[in-house]
Amino acid sequence: MTMRKITVLALCLIAGVSLATGPSYASAASKEIVKKMMDAHGGYANWKKKKTFSYDNIMFSESLPRTPFWVSKATIDKKTRKVYMDWPIHKSSMTYDGETAWSVDWKIGNPPKFEALFFYYFLNLPWITQDDNVNLSEAEKIKHDAWDNEVYVIDMTFKEKPAVGKTAKDNYKLYIDSETFMLVGYEYSIGYGHMLDLFGFPKDKDLFGPMFRINYAFTEVDGLLYPNLMRTSSQDQSQIYGYHSVINYSFDVPFDENRLQRPSNAVVDISSDKRK
């Protein structure tokens, strides 16, 4: 073999390593269950080809200080995960352009960076398992009092910070129905420093949670199944924190690039995932 061929082969091998994508699985069995979950929700290939994602999220919670309802209308470019969002009740808006998040007349306690992809991850969890920096644990089959059927439990963690408003410490516990393989619920913990400071947690605490959410009902959107009724509670379900109805799902709303132009009255979000 000539030196030129050796060099080309070496470059190809290096490229093969650097271009390797997808999650890390604890076992083949875990990988098979995650695949069945994605198939139950309409398949990864179908989800992957979608360009944009939009939805309206309606939340009711008696713990909200001013109004028990939060309503947000979001549109996300799935490839870049740029996002813009309107909050009609609060008459607020926010945008994340891939580098900077800003808002106009922001009246939400949570910072725009945190809100940008917060629910995008929840709603797309079956497919976000395939992101490059995801770790997926062994699957454990258990009986949980929230559901009649047994469920598979898989821990989802990150090798590094996955997106704006997220941290490497964020994690999810997926609950997958053992018969239908639908994602019927999950727990989540967040490590965004600004939020921990906002809640007044001790400085040695680096996670908020876990919170427990049940997906009660699903709706079909262009061949994919998405949750449209959810309940959020404490891990032991003794405290109910809120109810969600997600409506007007669409993959057909064009992403308005004009929304990425920062207006003169915008306020840039300088919140940090690090604690003060």
Image (spheres, rainbow, N blue to C red):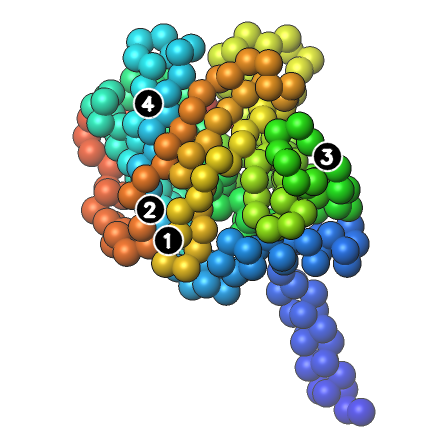
Circles 3 and 4: CB atoms closer than 8 Å: no
Q: Amino acid at mark 3?
A: Lys
Front position in the image: 222 or 110: 222
Circles 2 and 1: CB atoms closer than 8 Å: yes
Disc 3 target residue: 143
Separation (CA) of disc 3 from disc 4: 33 Å
Query: Can residue 118 be seen in this snapshot?
Result: no
Residue 120, relative to residue 92: is it above or below? below
| Secondary structure found at label 3 | loop
Tell whether 9 sits left or right of 118.
Answer: right
Disc 1 target residue: 221
Q: Position of residue 198 (x, y in %)?
A: 49, 12
Residue visible at 70% across and 58% down in the picture? 32
Earlier residue among tags 1 and 3: 3
Q: Residues within 10 Å of mark 2 (few under 14, many from 20)?
A: many
Separation (CA) of disc 2 from disc 1: 7 Å
| Secondary structure found at label 2 | strand
Disc 2 target residue: 249
Residue visible at 36% across and 8% down in the picture? 65
Circles 2 and 4: CB atoms closer than 8 Å: no
Tell whether 132 sits left or right of 270.
Answer: right
Q: Amino acid at mark 2?
A: Tyr
Of the residues tagged 1 and 3, which is closer to the observer? Answer: 3
Front position in the image: 67 or 82: 67
Q: How many marks?
A: 4
Separation (CA) of disc 1 from disc 3: 30 Å
Front position in the image: 46 or 243: 243
Disc 4 target residue: 70
Q: Position of residue 208 (x, y in %)?
A: 60, 20
Earlier residue among tags 2 and 1: 1
